[in-house]
Amino acid sequence: MLKVTNLQAKIDGKEILRGVDLEVRAGEVHAIMGPNGSGKSTLAQVLAGRENYEVTGGTVEYDGSDLLELAPEERARAGLFLAFQYPVEIPGVSNVYLLKAALNAVRKHRGEPELDAMDFLTLVKDKLKLVEISQEFLYRAVNEGFSGGEKKRNEILQMAVLEPRLAILDETDSGLDIDALKIVANGVNSLRSPDRAIIMVTHYQRLLDYIVPDFVHVLSDGRIVKSGGRELALELEERGYSWLEGDAQPAAQSGARAGAGS
Amino acid sequence: MATATHQLDALIAQEYKHGFVTDLETDTIPRGLNEDVIRLISAKKNEPEFMLEWRLAAYRHWLTMIEPNWAHVHYPPIDYQEISYYSAPKSNKDGPKSLDEVDPELLRTYEKLGIPLKEREMLAGVVAVDAVFDSVSVGTTFKKKLGEMGIIFCSFSEAVQEHPGLVRQYLGSVVPSGDNFYAALNSAVFSDGSFVYIPKGVRCPMELSTYFRINAQNTGQFERTLIIADEGAYVSYLEGCTAPMRDENQLHAAVVELIALDNARIKYSTVQNWYPGDKEGRGGIYNFVTKRGDCRGANSHISWTQVETGSAITWKYPSVLLKGDNSVGEFYSVALTNNRQQADTGTKMIHIGKNTRSTIVSKGISAGRGQNAYRGLVKVLKSADRARNYTQCDSLLLGDRCGAHTFPYIEVKNPTAKVEHEATTSRIGEDQMFYCLQRGISAEDAVSMIVNGFCKEVFKELPMEFAVEAQKLLGVSLEGSVG
Ligand SMILES: Nc1ncnc2c1ncn2[C@@H]1O[C@H](COP(=O)(O)OP(=O)(O)OP(=O)(O)O)[C@@H](O)[C@H]1O
Ligand SMILES: [Mg+2]
């Protein structure tokens, strides 16, 4: 579904991604861990098409087409969803309005009829239950005055409504209380299916107790320096990242290749 | 944000959609201004003597005045002798009695502008339309129904003929003929406009509406509107305009006077979309307007709501004189400037009576090289015990070549008064844009959404159908249709 090869990216002249290789197939859940500032969010944002980042090398294939050629909104419509580490506030625009516009943009792209207000509300109310958000949130301005945890849950609500093919969750677990973590995990797990894939950026192996990944990768200094299974996260929890430093291998080599098979 | 920026720029660069010229033959007075021209205007309109005298007095006063230059706007000097002070659609010399008599070309023009008079007429009593084409009213509907309630809604010329007593009593009682340079000019030469009188205790059952357009080349537009809400009366009045594309700058100096007696309420809403000029600012309308409301009676209430997207230069400060005890004045404004547009707008709230309250919410949006200035005066006189004002002034910038300026003036002469002022300036954030794009929303819709959200507090003050129009003007699809 997603094949990232030797991806390199800069921001403001500073090299952040130095050759990332990652392959994600439908049905898989991948966790990406790594020290602060290693480039995890950068990778997520580059995949989503943020323009501040300059892609200086490498390729990204998504569902057989060149992802880097697509504008951000085209990527979104093609089923790529990013749950932001820091969701932004949009004053005066109600949550429900943004959600409806987003869903209808995606549906239009898929050649499905746009939903009218009634059908949309029915759909959203269902999803609200899934992430246990009260209906009142629909009518508040997007993320305005939301607590940190509420913002994260709101991202999951959007994901649940948009039903993406590939969801990238950037530290969606940070700042969540235990109950909220379970709710979010529930929401994510309910989306798991053989034709979808999920990439989770996280610092805490605790999340992985709830959403069990197929693969765990360590991103360090702009490269994936180690990949493994579920147990890698436990090892990281015990040993930290320092033992991996120096493990960074030249991007062209396949040692850091992620995922199983090709 | 290269792509997002480009899309933003492309949106901002969109050409004015309503640019076209109708070739109606017009009956135009030769250019220039002197007492003979004023006598001619007055004679053409068959006015009573008091009107001519009033015009002449205004003209003589105007001659002694100097054009103001304190506003934050720049434009080449206007040659007032190069302007023609009267024009009427030729086919309309004797005034049409109904829409059927209106030049079909004119009706088609309105249709192109999305103002389907006929449809509106059919909208079963929702809106009465007093459409003004250039200087003379060409169609008035629902007059009969309103007439049965004692409501007068007609062109200013007609009011002068039919209700000279009311005109004489109230004309110039809020904006004196010598009030300012443009108001004096208007008083001398005004051609037509609207007149509304709502009798005691009557609640006007429909929104009254006037669509203004400017069409004849080089014709200054001098509209005059007078609205009187007698004791306990209520009226909501809508003013909207769009204009055709042209080359030469056009002057528009209107005067609007509102009078609210005891317990009366007037809600005046404007959507203004005159031709702003091309990308270099050529050919746009100069809009120098004097709008003032007089809360003359106790517990009276006047609100101005405006959405200003057009004109090359806007100079406009709808104001309220809060004379009656417990009277309320409100000003809600969205002003958008793009390309080379300049707007210097704001309000004045003059607190005179006791317990008077005023609210000001101003939203300025600047894009391209647009310059947007908010200029507000809150004045609390000695007599105004416990007066209260709340002012909120927000500016939104799109791109980095535009500007926003805020000039709040506060004068308080009564120690029991409370005046609050808040101001913010923000940019459409790249992060907000990206957030919307990442959800699959197009750049165009994202900008609309964000701008619309920014204006929400003002839009919710507009009558429903006008709010829709306002959002369209900002290139926005309907916000809140679900919620
Ligand atoms: N505009 C910029 N100019 C220079 N450096 C930048 C800029 N934006 C981000 N960076 C740097 O890029 C690096 C990677 O940032 P990124 O947000 O991808 O890290 P991360 O792995 O997500 O970290 P965290 O775990 O703290 O979220 C950081 O060192 C950051 O300071
Ligand atoms: Mg991060």
Image (cartoon, rainbow, N blue to C red):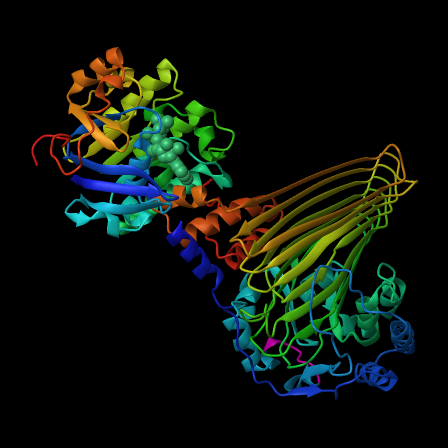
The residue closer to the viewer here, B223 or B117, is: B223
| Relative horizontal placement of residue A70, taking residue B385 as reference (left or right) | left
The residue closer to the viewer here, B162 or B287, is: B287
Q: Quadrant of residue B357?
A: top right
The residue closer to the viewer here, A24 or A76, is: A24
What residue is rendered at 42% in x and 33% in y?
A87
Q: Can residue B327 be seen in the rendering of this structure? A: yes
| Relative horizontal placement of residue B154, taking residue A85 as reference (left or right) | right
Query: Which residue is the extreme one toward the top?
Result: A238
Q: Taking the image as four quarters, which one is ligand 2 found in?
A: top left
**Magenta segment, prevailing SS (helix, strand or loop):** loop
Q: Residue A227 placed where, x, y %?
A: 16, 25
What residue is rendered at 80% in x and 65% in y?
B68
Residue B96 is one of the magenta-drawn residues:
yes
Query: Which residue is the extreme one toward the left?
Result: A261
What residue is rendered at 29% in x and 49% in y?
A74
Q: What segment is highlighted magenta in the picture?
A: B94-99
What residue is rendered at 57% in x and 51% in y?
B464
| Relative horizontal placement of residue A169, taking residue A251 as reference (left or right) | right
